[in-house]
Image: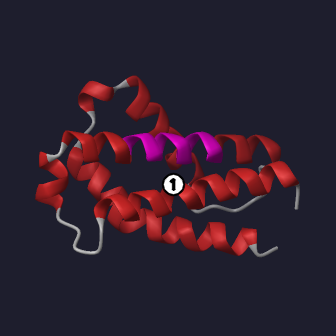
Amino acid sequence: MNRELKKYLFDIRTSIDSIDEYLGENRNFFKFEESKILRRAVERELEIIGEAMNMILKIDSTLNFENARQIVDTRNFVIHNYDRVDNVIIWGIISKHLPKLRIEVEQYLML
């Protein structure tokens, strides 16, 4: 696997790890919603994940990520529509989609 591709995969994994660290073991939506700093930190990591995925798709569009296009679209939405970011949607992404993405990234990093 291309070294540049591995770098972007590593960036995604690092951002997912960072989000997990920010939220801690006892994840609480209401604490997330109340903390502007926490929300902004998570949004920034989602931006990094989306940009890294965009670069991955440019390098090798044959890699199969279940939600690749949605990941890039989320990045674009968070950046360009910062005033309309919905905390419930972000929480859903964190809870439902990032664990799946972590598994996909880990599989490619093992190649």
The residue wearing badge 1 is: 15
Q: Please identify the quarter of the rendering in which residue 13 is found.
A: bottom right
Q: Viewed as shown, does residue 38 lie left or right of 45? A: left
Q: Position of residue 6 (x, y in %)?
A: 77, 57
Q: Residue shown at 79%/52% (left/top)?
A: 5
Q: Viewed as shown, does residue 65 lie left or right of 58? A: left
Q: Position of residue 60 (x, y in %)?
A: 81, 50
Q: Position of residue 63 (x, y in %)?
A: 75, 59
Residue in front for this viewpoint, 57 or 19: 19
Q: Residue shown at 54%/42% (left/top)?
A: 48
Q: Residue shown at 59%/52% (left/top)?
A: 68
Q: Which residues are magenta?
A: 43-53
Q: Viewed as shown, does residue 53 lie left or right of 79? A: right
Vertical relation: 50 (above or below) 20 = above
Vertical relation: 101 (above or below) 40 = below
| Magenta span main SS | helix
Q: Name the amino acid type tagged 1.
A: Ser
Q: Residue shown at 41%/24% (left/top)?
A: 80
